[in-house]
Image: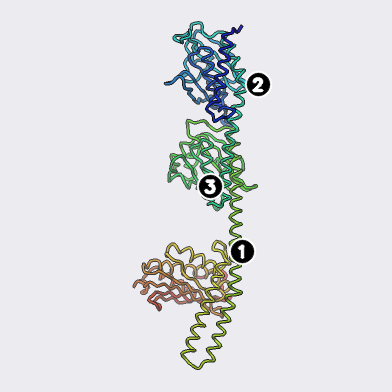
Amino acid sequence: MVNETSVRRLLDGVLDVLDARAGHGGSPVPEPAAVLARIAAAATRLTRASHGAFVLVPSTAADQGGEGYTDVVTVGLGANPAEPVWSRERTTAGKGPSEAKPERLLVSGSATNGAGHPLPGGFPATTSVLRMPVYVEDTLFGQLLLADKLSGGDHDGADERGFTEHDEDAVAGLVTAMAPLIGMASAYGKVELRLRWLTAAQEITGVLLRGDDPAAALRLIAERARIVSGSAVGAIARPDERADQLVFDVVATEGPVPADASGLSVSVRGTATGQAFTTGEPVLVRDYGTLAATYQSGWSGATMPDLVTALDSAIAVPLTVGDLPVGVLLVARGHGTVPFDADDVQLVRMFASQAALALEFGRAEQDRHKLAVFENRERIAHDLHDLVIQRLFAVGLGLEGLGKLTTDAKAGALVSGFVHDLDRTIKDIRNSIFSLQHPVEAPGGVRADLLRLCLGLRGTLGFEPRLSFDGPLDTAIPAAMRADLLAVVDKALTHAARRAEATAATVEVVVDRAGRTLTTTVADNGAAHPGERAGQDGEIAELEVLAADWDGTFSIGGVPGAGTGLTWTVRLPRHDARTQGGHA
């Protein structure tokens, strides 16, 4: 029978636990950790135990064959007995600090960590033990352990009688009263974690919809996944061009990313990451670092960096848009930490699906922006062609007619010069129109290839070469000759870049009206070195060979304005075998 004193002590214990709401920002539900620590502390005071612990039900990952971990909060031990101490201990097949179906246990006289009474590591019990299972809505949540009852109100020594049935009933009453609060706090913890994942997903969506750099968005996805999941590493792997390897081109760690950790590649076959990519389903694995190192050594002979070999529990989740996988999100924890469980897999999967959708929206937004740019460029190109060129052409015809009317030879020469300048201006505008209508990244004919080549050499040259065309390049130049033409322009501009005094260059590619001759002239405002003009330069000699292969000529020398010019002239094959397959 419980006396009035016991009832008061029980009520005091309940009020102590409820006071856990204080200091949590006014939240109606305290954090689960605070509730469990308060229950353990209240139980030790209620029974005058030397120390106590709340042991949660072991969490077991689906692929671990019964091996899992147990969270334990201990009070009354350590350097500061008033402070709760959290620890995590491994359990295997029901063995460890928490049994599968614990029952009430009251032991007096002697209790150790031996068989029959498993206690948390570092939890001494020398005289007595009281164990009380904790159920929340008929589901086992954990167990409350109390050890070494103290005698008297001053807690100076051990009570040889140990815990009594009154103590057992008081703890049972405390646990029963606190079960609803434990359930609410546990649910609150899960909701809060889910909210953190949703907040991270919303942040990524906002970044992508603002039109920020997609590469920065990928780094943000990996970093947020790492932080929210409590992982050591977050990474994104994407398929290479052949889609038979996955490349980890985005890696996020707590500190600086080691140079040997970024750019790692793994096969899509035989790896956890590859399995997630090919099946579209998440993969949960233990000892990821060892498995990855072993596989990589046998597959490519490469050695994995220390950052990877130190990883243990890992989740690989596909980044999927519709039915199409676009990559894999990997989060991994180090050895000695809590492994992931099935709940973690579902949360990471939810985050990955939202991140992939945000990536697709971001890509669609970029495509919409590109389309708007292309439409604007097309409008400008039409305006240039229909208005500017037509007007310049009319002015040129008028000047040409005026030149025929004059009898002054000097004036006639000036007018002819103006007409020639207008013709060159019209050609330049037509080249600009072509550039506007054919984006650099789009595949195309000879003109598009030359434009892409010249723009690609801007960094090497320090300036953008001026490019002009004339004649039916795309129809008259066969595929085999196109490759040689691009090689000639590339080598000529590369030589121009070697001249420190060269600050401008022009490339002129002309097919005559009969479609028989292709003439390519590359000129710059720098001076050629003697070896070039003498034909002693190896690459210059290659240009001569390329010209000879097509029954053509090559020359290099000075041009008006104290510059250097290379001229490559070849015959265009007509109904020749070389148009079908190349040249000798």
- Between tags 1 and 3, which lies in front? 1
> Which of the numbered marks, if any, corresponds to residue 218?
3
Instruction: Residue type at mark 1: give it.
Output: Glu
Residue named by callout 1: 375
Tag in front: 1 or 2:
1
Residue at disc 3, secondary structure: helix
> In the image, what residue type sits under mark 3?
Leu
Secondary structure type for disc 1: helix
Residue at the extreme left of the image, as rendered: 530
Name which residue type carries label 2: Asp
Q: Is residue 222 above or below residue 427?
A: above
Q: Which residue is pictured at 59% across the width and 68% down the height?
A: 380
Query: In the image, which disc is placed on residue 138?
Result: 2
Q: Is residue 276 visible?
A: no
Viewer-nearest residue: 410 or 100 = 410
Question: Which residue occupies the foreground of this view, 523 or 477?
Answer: 523
- Circles 1 and 2, Cβ within 8 Å, touching? The answer is no
* Residue 245 horizontal/vertical position (percent): 54, 48
Task: First in sequence, mark 2 or 3: give its number.
Answer: 2
Task: Estimate the spatial distance between the alpha carbons at disc 1 and disc 3, rounded to whole Å.
Answer: 29 Å
Mark 1 or 2 closer to N-term? 2
